[in-house]
Structures are given as C-alpha cells and as structure tokens.
Image: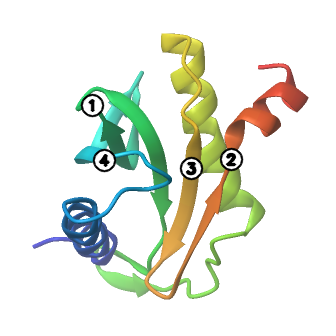
Amino acid sequence: MLSREAAFQDDLKRILENVSSKYRFDGIEISRVERDYPIGRKKADIIAFRQKVIPFLIIETKRKFERTGYWRVRRNFRPLDASVVGQAISYAALYKDLNGYVVPFFATANPNAIAFLEPPRILRLMSI
C-alpha cells in the first residue's frame, strides 16, 4: 500500500506528464518526469526533464504521514515553509555539486498548493 505522500506524488507526476504532453513551459518541452530520482545518496520526490536527460524542475512534496502502530498527522506543511523550501533547495544544490549543472527551477507542493521558485539566484547568494 502506498503512503499518502507517495500517492500524492504519483498523482502530481501523472498531472505533469499529461500537461507536458500538450503544452510547453516557457517554450521548454518537458519530455520525462521521474519520481524518487536519486541525487547522490538522496532521492528527490519528482524531477521533470527536458530533452529526456536535462533536469528542468525539482519538486519536493509534503503530505500527512502515518507511522506504524499509530497516526502522526502534520497538516501545516505549506509549500513556502522554510523546512520544505530548504529541503528542495538542498536537492538543487546537491545536483549542482555532483553534476555542475544548476536545475533552473524547483517547486514545493502539498495537495492544496504548489510554489515554483528559481534556485540560480539563491545558489549564487549562497556561493554554492
């Protein structure tokens, strides 16, 4: 059985695939969408690629979660919470560190909202 977050990730991945099969994003064609994509020893929730191999968008998702034996629910994950944005930017920074390429966009999402952000400015400010 999929966790609630995994089910949300699958839904979001399907939406991105459906939309990108019909539309372009600022002239860019998204040709592939992957879930749990490895970056070093970490896994980004969702990455959208252009030209099948060039990362274009990293998405960090948050959803209520369950622990074995009891429910632990956290409902206040907002896409712009510092911890959520921090996790997403860490994937962008790690990707740049490992591959020398700055992924142009990242996003954070929950089932109610999505926030798109641009890491190059943040990475320059952080001198990463």
Split into 4 quadrants, where in the image is the N terminus? bottom left
Q: Secondary structure at mark 2?
A: loop
Is mark 3 in CB contact (under 8 Å) with mark 2?
A: yes
Give the amino acid at mark 3. Answer: Phe
Sequence order check, earlier mark of 4 and 2: 4
Determine which quarter of the picture holds residue 31.
top left
Sequence order check, earlier mark of 1 and 2: 1
- Would you say 71 lies left or right of 83 here? left
Determine which quarter of the picture holds residue 49.
top left
Query: With respect to residue 2, does 40 lie above or below?
Result: above
Q: Secondary structure at mark 1?
A: loop
Sequence order check, earlier mark of 4 and 1: 4
**Considering depth in this image, is 120 or 8 the residue closer to the camera?**
120
Label 1 to label 2: alpha-carbon separation: 20 Å
Residue beneath label 2, please? Answer: 118
**Considering depth in this image, is 32 or 67 the residue closer to the camera?**
32
Q: Secondary structure at mark 4?
A: strand
Residue beneath label 4, please? Answer: 30
Residue 56, position as x, y percentages in the image: 45, 40
Residue beneath label 3, please? Answer: 106
Query: With respect to residue 12, does 92 lie above or below?
Result: above
Residue 10, position as x, y percentages in the image: 22, 67
